[in-house]
Image (cartoon, rainbow, N blue to C red):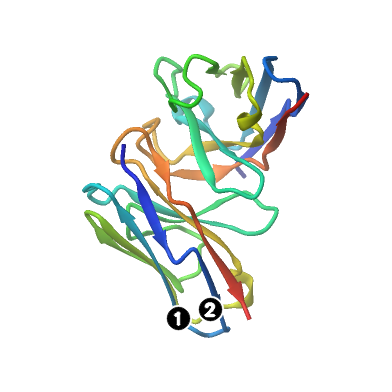
Amino acid sequence: EVQLVESGGGLVQPGKSLRLSCTASGFTFSTYGMSWVRQAPGKGLEWVSSISGSGSSTYYADSVKGRFTISRDNSKNTLSLQMNSLRAEDTAVYYCAKGDSSGYVRIPFDYWGQGTLVTVSS
Amino acid sequence: EIVLTQSPDFQSVTPKEKVTITCRASQNIGSGLHWYQQKPDQSPKLLIKYASQSISGVPSRFSGSGSGTNFTLSINSLEAEDAAAYYCHQTSSLPPRFGQGTRLEIK
C-alpha cells in the first residue's frame, strides 16, 4: 500500500525558514517523480515544485522560485522542501504527491499525503 | 502560461442526477488534462487521467472526455458520497496548473 506522510509544518514568522519532509513507502521511491502541491485555507490547489526520480531535475512555480528548494534522499525514501524567506501568502496545507510514472512534472499525481499545515504569521 | 477555467464554481444537485463539470484551457493542451476529487478535510484523489483514462478503484459513474481546450467530467447517477470539490489539472505545458475548482453539494 502506497503511503506518503508529511511532517515539519507549523507556525513560523515572516522571513524565517522551515523544512518539510515526506516519507514514502509501498513503492519503489526512486522510480517516480514527486511533487509538492499546496492549498491555502479555503482555496484551491496550487502546484509548487516537482523533482525527478533521480533528483537530477527540478522545477518550481514562479511564486516560490529562488526561495524554496525541493530535494530527495532515495536511500531514505524521503522527499523534502526547504522553504526560506517565508511570506504570509505561503500559508497553506502542503501536500506531497507521487507522480504516476517515471516522468516528473508532466504527469498526474496518483497518490497524495495527508498534508502538513504551514502558517506564516508574526 | 495556460489558464484553466472550470464551470460551474458551485452546483447543488440531487442524488441520482447526472452532473457535468467543464474545464476550459486557454490554449490547446491535447489530452494532458486530469481530474481530482477532494472531499472535505481529505487529500485530493485522482479520478481521471489524460482526459478520459479511468483509474483503478474509481467508480464507473465517473468519466472524462474532451481534448484540445474543452474537457468534461461527468458523474452519472450521483451519490451522496460524491459531495466534494473537483479540480482539473493540466500537465501538457509548463508550469502545470489546476483549475479553480468546482464544489458539488448534494441536496
Mark sitting on residue B78: 2
- Earlier in the chain: of badge 2 and badge 1, it is 1
Task: Name the element at disc 1.
Answer: loop
- The answer to whether the residue labelled 2 contacts the one labelled 1, judged by CB atoms less than 8 Å apart, is yes
Residue B106 relative to residue A56: left or right: right
**Quarter of the image with the C terminus of chain A in it:** top right
Mark sitting on residue B1: none
Q: Residue at x 58, y 78 (%)?
A: B79
What is the three-letter code of the residue carrying label 2? Leu
Q: Position of residue B23 (x, y in %)?
A: 36, 59
Q: Residues within 10 Å of mark 1 (few under 14, many from 20)?
A: some
Task: Name the element at disc 2.
Answer: loop
What is the three-letter code of the residue carrying label 1? Lys
Q: Chain of mark 1?
A: B
- Which residue is identified by label 1? B18
Q: Is residue B82 above or below residue A17?
A: below
**Quarter of the image with the N terminus of chain A in it:** top right
Q: Is residue B4 above or below residue A104?
A: below
Q: Nearer the viewer, residue A4 or B68?
A: B68
Q: Position of residue A80 (x, y in %)?
A: 60, 21
